Image (cartoon, rainbow, N blue to C red):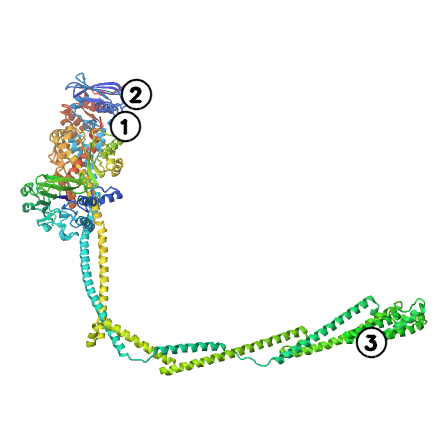
Amino acid sequence: MKFIHLADAHLDSPFRGLSFLPKSEYQEIKDAANESFTRIIDLAVREAVDLVLIAGDTFDSNKPSPASQVFFKKEIDRLTAAGIQVVMIFGNHDYMRKSDLLVKEGPHFTLLGDGEQIERKDFTTKSGFAYNVTGFSYAHNHIEEDLLMQFPEKAPSFTIGLMHAGQAAGQNNVYAPFTLERMRELGYDYFALGHIHARQTLLAKPLVVYPGNIQGRDIGELGAKGCYLVEVDEESGQSQLTFCPTSQIVWEQANLVLDAPLSASDLADKIAATLRAHESAGVKTFVSLKLTGSEYLTPDQLTFWQDPAAWEEASSQANSARLVDFRVKVRGLVQLSSTDQAALDRAKVEILSEEKIKQLAASWIKKDPEARRLAENPEFLAQVKELVSVKLADRLQDIGGSGE
Amino acid sequence: MKLKQIQIYNFGQFSDEIFDLPDGNLAAFFGENEAGKSTTVAFIKQILFGFNLKNTASSFFEDYEPLSKAYPMGGKLVFAGDGDWEIERTYSKGDKSKVGAVKVWHRGQEVPEILFYDQIQNIDGNFYADSFIFNEDLMRQLASLSEEEILENIYYLGAAESSKLLSIRSDFAKEAKDLFKASGKKAPVNQDLILLNEKKEQVAANESAFDDYQKLEAARLAKQKQLADLMAIRKGQEAELKQCEKLLEQAQNYENYLRLKKAQKDVAFDPDLYQKAVDLNAQIKALKTAAAKEVAEPVDLTDLSGAKAQLANFKGRLEDLTRTLQTSQLQYEQLEDKQRNILEFSPDLADVKDMPVADFQQLQADWEKVNAESQAEAVDEAPLSKGLPLAGGILLAAGLVILFANRTLGILLLLVGAGLLAYAFYQKGQAGQEKAAANDLKQDFAKKYVFSSSVKVDSLVTPYRDYSLNRKSMVSLDQQIQEREAELADLGQEVALFAKKTPENEPALINKQLAGAEKQLEDLADQQRVYRQKQEALSGYQKQIADLEKQLLTIFNQAKVADLASYQALAAAKREQDTAKAQIEALANSLGDQLPLFEKAGFDLAALKGKMAGLSQQLADSDRDLAALQQESANIKAEERQYADSSQVYEGKQKLAQLEEKFARDSQNYLATLLAGEVIGRTLDLASNDRFPKMLVLAKKYFALLTGGRYQDILLPEKVSKRTPMKVVRSDKKKLAVQYLSRGTQEQLYFALKLAFVMQIRDKIDLPILIDDSFVNFDGPRTTNIVNLLNELSKNKQILVFTAREDLAKQVSEVPYRYVKEASHA
C-alpha cells in the first residue's frame, strides 16, 4: 500500500514579510501554496497511491474563499477520478462542518470525524489490502481535551490515526493536546498528524509524523516543504517514509558574523556571497540574513542595509536567492567606563524584564488587541530586546568609542 | 597621584616651560587673562588623553599646535606618590596619529601605557573634563540649561558622562513619542493601527464570501431540481398532446370517410366515345382555325381591260407627240444656228434683216442705181443674179426629195426653189436700166439709209433671203411646236384624270403618272387573283367542318348530352367518383381498428379540440417557466463563477498580513526606542544611586562651606520626581525644594555635588582637580567660603587653581606660580 500524508496546506494564507516585493514578483508567490498542493496531487496520481491523508488546516480560515474551495474541489476531483481514496480532517484554522465543503462526500472522498466526533472508517486498496483511518475534525478553533484518550484500540487491519493536534507539552495547548505515551499504548501503525509546520517524526514506533506545511509563508517556516510518501510493506506492516518537496519557494536563515569593520563594497560582496551559498536548484529561496556584530557597521551601513532596495541589489548578485529580511545583532556592547557599564547592564536586565516591558508599554498594549497579542509573543519581545541593544550600541558609540 | 611637575616641550604659546608644583595639595597659578592659564589646563588634559589636532567643538580639543612651530609638540607630566608615574605625549609633523605618541614610565621604568590608564579606570578625556575640570566651559554649559535640566544634571552627577547620557535619553524619549502616542492619529504606529483595523473589518466582510457562495450553490441546486421536475411534467404534457393530435387526425379521417361515402354515386359514361368526341372537337377546332386564316379583305373586282386599252392609247399618243415635238424643236434649233451663222458671215445683215421684203428690195434697187451709175464697168453681173437660178434649182430638187420624208418641208422647199428661179429671170432684165441713174442716186441713197452706199448691198441679198426664209420656217416650226404642246397639255389633262392626279404637261411627268397608273392596275389585278384563290380554299374548309360537326352531333346524341361542356362535366363527375372511392379505401385502411369503434360510438370532436388547446397552453406555460428557470440558473452560475475567480479574499488577507507586519515592525521600533531611553535613564539612576549616599555626605559639607553655613543638608528622596523633589535644609531647618533656590545657590549646589562626586571616586581615579577662577566668580565673603572649601578638599586631593585674582592666589598658595612675560611671549 502506498499513501501520501500532507497537512497544513493553509490555502489562502498570506505571505509575511514581503510587502516590499514588486507587484510582479508578488503575483508569482501568491499562488505558491496552490502550486505546491497541485504538485502533491500530481505526485499522488503519478505514483498511483491508494490513499491521500489530509491532516487539517487545508484552508487558512473556517470561511475559506470560494476561489480556494473551487480550487480544492478541482484537485480532489482529480484524485477521486483516478480512484484514489482521500481522507481528510479539519484543523483549528479550517474548523468547519462537512456541509461547508464544496467537495461532497463520495465513495472516494471522506471527511472524517465531522463535528469533533471520533470516527473510524474501513477501506480496502484495489489490490485488497485492508486498512482503516481513525480521526476527528475541529468544529471550533480550540479543542482542549485530549481526544486521543477516546480513540478505539488498534484494529486487525493496518490502522492509521489522523489528527490535527499538538503534543501536551505546554500549559496552554488548546489544540487537542496528546501524549506519546497514549500513542504507544494505542499501538496504531501510523499517526498522521498536522498542526506543527516543521516536519518531524515524534516516534518511530508507532510512527508519529508531522509532514510540516506544504509551503513556508514567512521566515519562521524554514527549509523545503512538501509531503510524505509512505510505502507500507503489506506483509510486515512496516512503513517507509519519503519526503517529497513540492514548494516552489523556500525560506532560509543565513548568518553573517562581523568581527571587524568592512568597507561598503566588501560588506555587499560578503552579503551576496552569503546569499549564493543558500541557493538550491529549482526553487526560489527567500533568505533572512542575520548579521552579528552590528557595532562594526557604520551608521550609514546600518541604515543602508535596512532598506529593501539594498536587498534587491544584493539579490541581483544571486541567481535564485532573494534577500527578504535583514536583522542585526550586537556582539558585545561598546566600552563604557566599567562602573557605568555595570549600571547599564543592570539597567538592561531591569528594564527588559517582561514585566517591566509590559508596564512601560502599557499605553501601547492598551491601544489595540493586536498590540496585546504581540506583547504576548516571546519572539516579538526577543526582537524588541535585540533592537534595544542595537539602538543603545548605536548611540553610545560616541561615548565609549571616541578618544583613542 | 599627585602632579609634581609639568614639562611643556612645545604647546600653544609655551616652549620649554617647566612648572614645579609645591609640596602641598593646593597650587595656584596666577596670571592675567591670556597669560596661559587655559593653555596649561588644556595641556594637562591633552597630555593625559591625547591631542586633537582636528578642529572640534570642545574647547579641550582646541588646536594647541605650537605657535613657535617648534616640534615635537607635547610634554610630560610627572606624578609623585603611588609609585612615580611619568607620562609623555609628543607629536611631530607627519606623525600618523594625531593624538600623539605616548610613553609612560613607572618608577623610572618605561612601561606599557595601559598600566597607567588602568590606574585611572580607563576613563576618557570627556569624563575627566566633565568631572575634574571646573572652568568657563562648565559654566557656560550650566548657564544654558533650564532649571529643570540643572536639577537633572545635579541628580545624575553620580554617573560619569551624565550629560551625554541625559541627552541620549531625552532623544530616545522624544523619538519614542514621535513613533507612538497613547492618543492621537498621526504617529506612525497609530497610523498603522487605523489602517490595520480598517483592513480587518474589510477582511471580516470578505469572509462572508463563502457563505454567499454557499447560498448561491444551494439556490443553484434548488433551481436544478425545479428544472428537472418541470422537464418531467413537460414531457408528460407533450406525450398527451401528441396522443390527442393522433386521435384528432383519426377523427378527421373518419369524418372525411363519412363525407366521401355519402357523396358516392354511379355515373354512366363511355370513356372511348368521350375520347372520340374530344378528338372530333379538337379536329373541328383545328379546321376552324385554318379556315379563319383564309378569310380575305373584299377586293374591287371590276374588269380592267378598258382601262388597260386606254392606258395603251395614252402611251401611244404620248410617244408620237414626244417624238414630233422633239423633231420640231431640233429643226428649230438648227434654224436658229443657221441664222446665227448667217449673221456671223454677213454682219451688215443685222441692219437689214428685219426689213420687210419690199423695203429691202427698194434698198437693193436704190443701191443698185447708185452703184450702176458710178461703177458701170466695174460692176459685173451681180452674183445674185447668177446664183439665184442655181439656188432655185437646187431647192426644187431638194424639195422633191424631202417631200417624201416630210411633206410640209418638202412643199416648202419646192415653193422656195420655184420662187428663186422666177426672181432670177426678173433681176436680169432690170440691171441695165438702173446703172445709169446710179450716180445721181448715190446721194439720195445716203440720205435715205443709215449706212453708206459702199456697203455691198448686193452681197446681202442672198443672206437676207436665206435669213428671211429661215425665219419663215422657224415661225412655221414654232407654230407646229405650240400646237403639239397644246396637244400634249390635253393629253396631260386626260392622263391626270385617268390616274386621278394633278395634270402635268411635261412628257416625262406624264409618263411617270402613266407608269404609276399602270402599276396600280397591275396591283389590283394581283389582289383580284389572290382573293379568288382564298375564296376557293375557304369553301373547302367549311365543307369539312360541316362533315365533322355532323359526326360530333351523332356522338352527343349517343351519349345523351347536349353539347361538349355537358359531356365534359359528365367526365369530371366520373373522375371525382373514382377518386372518392380510392380515398374511402385509404381512410378505411388508415383508421383500421378505430373504424368499427367510431362507427359504433361516434366521437366528440369539439371536446377533443378543447382538450388539446388546454394542453398546448400548459405546454407553452411549461416552456416559459423552463426558460425562466434556465435563465435564473445561468445567472446564479455566473455569480458563482465570479466568486470562484475572485482573489479578493486572498488579497485582503495578504494586505492585512502586510499591515500587521508593518504595525509589528513600527511597534518594535517604538518599543525599542522607548525601552532604550528607559535603559539609559535607569543606568543613570543606578550609576547615581550607587554613589549618592556617600557623595551626599561630602556634598552636604561642601555646600555648607560654599554657602557659609546657610545650608546644612541635602535631602535625596528614593526617586526624584516633581512630587518628590530633591530638597535642601536651610540653617533655620527649613526644607526647600531645589527648584525654589536662586540660580546662584543652585550653581553652588551643583558645584558642591560635582566636587563631592570627584572626591567620591578619588580612590579609583586619583587625578588633580583643575579650577579656573572664571568659574569661581564668587564675591568677597564667598571667596573666603571657597578658599575654606579648597582647603578642606586639598586635604585629600590635589587641586590646581588658575586665577587672575591675586588675593585668591595668595589665599590659596603661599607661593603661587606667576606666569612671566617670557612664558607668555608669543
Find the distance from the CA under tag 3 to the CA under tag 2: 195 Å
Q: Nearer the viewer, residue A349 or A9?
A: A9
Viewer-nearest residue: B624 or B495: B495
- The x and y percentages for residue B310 are 65, 79
Q: Amino acid at mark 1?
A: Asn
Please tell me in which quadrant of the rendered image residue A149 appears: top left
As drawn, A53 above or below B759: below
Secondary element type, mark 1: loop
Q: Are marks 3 and 1 on the same chain?
A: yes
Q: Which mark is residue B150?
A: none
Distance in Å between CA atoms under marks 2 and 1? 18 Å
Amino acid type at mark 3: Leu
Reading the image, the residue beneath label 2 is B69
Q: Which mark is residue B55?
A: 1
Q: Are marks 3 and 2 on the same chain?
A: yes
| Circle 2 Cα neighbour tier, 10 Å, few/some/many (<14 / 14–19 / ≥20) | some
